[in-house]
Amino acid sequence: MSLAFRTLSFGIKKGPPQKKKLNNDSKELSTITEDSFRKFDELREKMIGKVETKQKKKVVKKVAKQASIQILSSRKRGYDSENDSESETEEAVGDVEKKMQKLLDDIRRTNRIFTWGDQLPDIFLRFNDSSLSPSLLTHLSENGIRQPSPIQMQAIPFMMGRKNILASAPTGSGKTLAFALPVIDEILGLKRRADYSKSSKLLAIVLEPTRELAAQTYTEFVKYCSGTSISVANFSGEETDITHADILVSTPNRIVFHLDKIDTSFLRWLVVDESDRLFEVIEGQEKCFRNQLGAIYKACDAKCTRVAFFSATFSHEVEKWCKDNIENIGMVCVGERNSSNTSVKQELTYCGTEDGKKVAIRNLLRTAFRPPALVFVQSKDRAVQLVKLLSAIDSNLKVDSINSGKSDKERDETMERFRNGEIWVLVCTELLGRGLDLSDVGLVINYDLPTSIISYIHRVGRTGRAGKTGHAVTYFTDTDMKYIKSIATVIRQSGFDVPEYLMEMKKVSRDRKKEMLKRAPKRQKIATVKEQVRKQKIAKAAYEKKEKLEAGSNSVKVSKSKKKMRKITKSKA
Ligand SMILES: Nc1ncnc2c1ncn2[C@@H]1O[C@H](COP(=O)(O)OP(=O)(O)OP(=O)(O)O)[C@@H](O)[C@H]1O
């Protein structure tokens, strides 16, 4: 095996990956048939027509009443017939409305949009049907976004109606725009008012769990605010002066630290992206996300402030907290709650041991790989080790790692190189597990088994985004057997094959799940062949030395006991 490792070269295309192009052929994220669009347009026309007719009739009626007081009898007849036709119209309007409601419900069902709450707004089918401002519509079309995704169809009208919202939708399904568009739209409206256009007021805060994610969301806001007077700041980046920001994107710790200097009295929106992550508590950690979120939430208490929680996953605990603490909150859930993206082909690969994983990744990168790919490991040390191993396997492979052990600057540079195609395989920890939109990633490898199904869902969601297909491979060893069933279940629920024996394994107990969350299993170091050979040599030398020592001490012991025996026989004689 060692020779194979040394002489091996990956069978990948040696050219760097193509830079991201605007893909105008990409699949729409929602399913609306031509027939539904046609019916919708017809019904809407009818509704507008009927309402107009009804209004027209009211005007005519008023004029007639004033003008013809003399011809009472004929007017009486006229009145009766008008009343008849009015009730006919009302009935027809009600009929059309019902038909429209049924059509929208059918479209909701097809797109697996589930809602809870009072006064739910209707979905919209086309961006042009929404009342989003023209500048946003222009940006959408410039960015090749033609049709709203299911979460956008429902969440945008929700937020435009100024309702608090808890929303969940699969990874890569456009949640960022689902909250960014209504926030920007509302601020554009405010900016038209004299009291808002002249002075700087903080109007929206968007929280993200990592710097990388904050940078990405910030870029998205800047893109959609360009050409307007809205100022966006990324507090987790270089930015220190946030006094002129209308929209502030940040990780919670930066905001918490400067909370006393931030004026939230005009805040319209507090958006918590990856909300279940920000709800996480770490025992014994004062600065855990939940405490920070708690402090921010408390400070954002203006009457005009609404909250929006978004994530691909959410727990019953988050749901309960929202229902208990936020008045009048509506919920939107697209698809099955806590399920993985079905456009990602998912595989589980049994590797037996840690050495087996090395063989598996070598073979995978050699056969089924077109860069770029993301490889997840459970710790920063293992990220460094795996980069070393992959570089030793093929010196041509452009591989690097990103983890919390690197400085902010190093992390930013690595991300930039990965996005530019200079890095083909990026080895990372949980840090990149959530939210990042690296849309060219075609392959995700879970080199180390994720420690929860939530982590699994987010990790594999780094591929198969925006309606594209993706591929995710998850390795497991004998050590992982006791944790594998829940991930196997998620994969099967998404419609992919899982060996039957895995489904027959014992359910992962609650305690085991907790234990796994706290501490990932101990794993043997990912050593290169050279390191392994050196380690083997050292171990062999140590063993031989021990043998020698033991042999030496045994011969001393034997001669000592011989002497003793001689003494005893002498004394007996
Ligand atoms: N309506 C749309 N049609 C096509 N593409 C879209 C649409 N809306 C957003 N996108 C694109 O889809 C990609 C994924 O969007 P986004 O990052 O918002 O996903 P997400 O749902 O937040 O995922 P995650 O849960 O991983 O954070 C982005 O590149 C975005 O530009």
Image (spheres, rainbow, N blue to C red):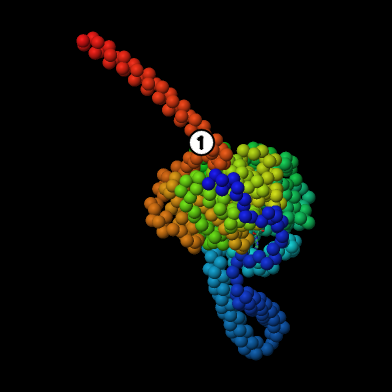
Q: How many marks?
A: 1
Does residue 294 appear anywhere in the picture? no
| Quarter of image, res 146 | bottom right
Q: Residue at x 61, y 84 (%)?
A: 85
Q: Residue furthest left?
A: 573
- Which residue occupies the foreground of this view, 453 or 534? 534
**Residue 437 placement (x, y as % from top left):** 64, 54
The disc labelled 1 sits on which kind of residue? Answer: Gln
Q: Is residue 309 above or below residue 381?
A: below
Image quadrant, ligand 1: bottom right
Q: Residues within 10 Å of mark 1 (few under 14, many from 20)?
A: few
Q: Position of residue 405 (x, y in %)?
A: 62, 38
Instruction: Return the residue nearer the eye: 321 or 139.
Output: 139
**Residue at the disc numbered 1:** 536
Label 1: state its secondary structure.
helix
* Residue at image coords 67%, 58%: 181
Q: Position of residue 551 (x, y in %)?
A: 40, 24
Q: Nearer the viewer, residue 380 or 97?
A: 380
The residue positioned 52% from the left and 48% from the top of the image is 357
Is the CB–ligand 1 distance for label 1 below 8 Å? Answer: no
Q: Above or below — where is 496 with respect to 257?
A: below
Report the side of 227 relative to 408 (left or right).
Answer: right
